[in-house]
Amino acid sequence: MAKKEFTVTPYEAEGKIDYNKLIDEFGVERLNDAVLQRIKKHTKELHLFLRRKVFFAHRDINWLLDQYEKGNKFFLYTGRAPSGPVHIGHLLPWIFCKWLQDKFGAEMWFQFPDEEKFLFKQDLTFEDTNKWMNENMLDVIALGFDPKKTRFIIDTKHANIMYKEACKVAKKITFSTIKASFGFTDSNNIGSIFYTSMQAVPAFLPSVLKGKNIPCLIPLGIDQDIHFRISRDVMPKLGYYKPAIIHNVFLPPLTGIGGKMAASGANESSIWTTDSEKDVEKKIKKYAFSGGRKMFFEPDDKKLQRIHNDYKSGKMLTSELKEVLIEKINSFLKEHQKKREKAKSQVDKFVNWN
Ligand code: TRP
């Protein structure tokens, strides 16, 4: 077998990712026009990330919409394992979640598995993950989620309601499945082997707590799909629906070398949500690769097309393109940072719900 040109797992993303191949390899469905139109029937407009194919694949969206059309509303679920600051690529699925919450009146369950990176990174302590979790929560709240309809679920804090459910999932997954799926070996620690069952829980916990089956939609980066490929098989065995999933691409690193913006390390190729205007300017001028990076932050399709054409024809220089990008990102971050400050007084509402 030829050496793989790229790898995508929750714990590794490398090489130039071919999303078409991923669709086949993972057995997900393309988010085609028919599905997009079906979504639009309910939302009236299509979010930028749907139009631009930032979200490009799914599992069972048609089933989810069947349920919705029968009056069976779904809740949203996604998450973030705290281990460092948040960069703008992380925000993509969360921004989209906020839009879905508004359009479908959906409850949002946001998991902070504060043990995940503790288990997976040698030198990360619980003090570290806790510190980053508190920071990361501000970024999520800043996006404008409705505090009455949004719950943060923290694995160690909410262990009392999660652990039993995680054990039910774990009982139905073998060690060999985990090894094969994640590429683990006998030297992986035993906590990491159990972890996927903790990530499964929020997909059906609302059904447990409310005593009735509620459909679930999980927007996620495609690297997270494997967790649910495994646990979706388990959930019907426990009497719950399989969650539907909608997958987003990675925001490529500024250097354009493939993979995703890395969250770890003092990595200059990422733009953190707390970066100053000067930081952003410096990073983009120094590191941004100019090969027509997709601009996720320009909502106007026509304007983007114009920029694209001007750049391609040579009418617009790389340096000018970078100025546009710097301006876009800085105006987004300025607003975000203001809301992030305000979020500090709101954390309690999102965390203390049980
Ligand atoms: N494992 C994810 C991460 O590394 C965090 C996460 C928890 C998550 N639950 C999720 C991501 C559900 C997507 C969907 O950040």
Image (cartoon, rainbow, N blue to C red):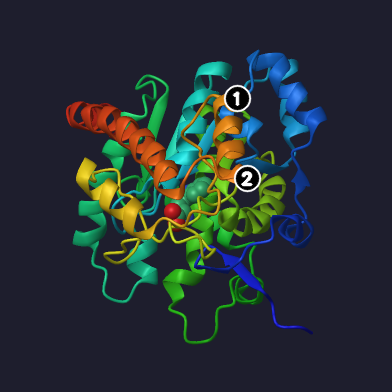
Q: Quadrant of the C terminus?
A: top left
In the image, is the residue at mark 1 within 8 Å of ligand 1 by its beta carbon?
A: no
Viewer-nearest residue: 209 or 150: 150
Is 353 placed above or below 240 here? above
- Callout 2: few (<14), some (14-19), or many (20+) C-alpha neighbours within 10 Å? many
Q: How many marks?
A: 2
Is 94 placed above or below 7 here? above
Residue that carries the numbered disc 1 in the rendered image: 302
- Residue 135 visible to the viewer: yes
Q: Quadrant of the N terminus?
A: bottom right
Label 1 sits on a secondary structure element that is helix
Viewer-nearest residue: 320 or 196: 320
Q: Residue at x 30, y 49 (%)?
A: 272
Residue that carries the numbered disc 2 in the rendered image: 247
Viewer-nearest residue: 231 or 3: 3
Q: Is residue 67 left or right of residue 284?
A: right
Q: Which mark is residue 351?
A: none
Percent position (x, y) of residue 294? 55, 44
Q: Is residue 67 left or right of residue 101?
A: right
Viewer-nearest residue: 27 or 203: 27
Q: Residue at x 40, y 37 (%)?
A: 324
Percent position (x, y) of residue 334? 25, 31
Q: Earlier in the sequence, mark 2 or mark 1?
A: 2
User: Farthest residue toward the right?
Assistant: 34
- Callout 1: few (<14), some (14-19), or many (20+) C-alpha neighbours within 10 Å? few
- Residue 133 visible to the viewer: no
What kind of residue is marked 2?
His
Label 2 sits on a secondary structure element that is strand
Is 353 placed above or below 88 here? above
Percent position (x, y) of residue 262? 40, 61
What kind of residue is marked 1?
Lys
Q: CA distance from mark 2 to mark 1?
A: 25 Å
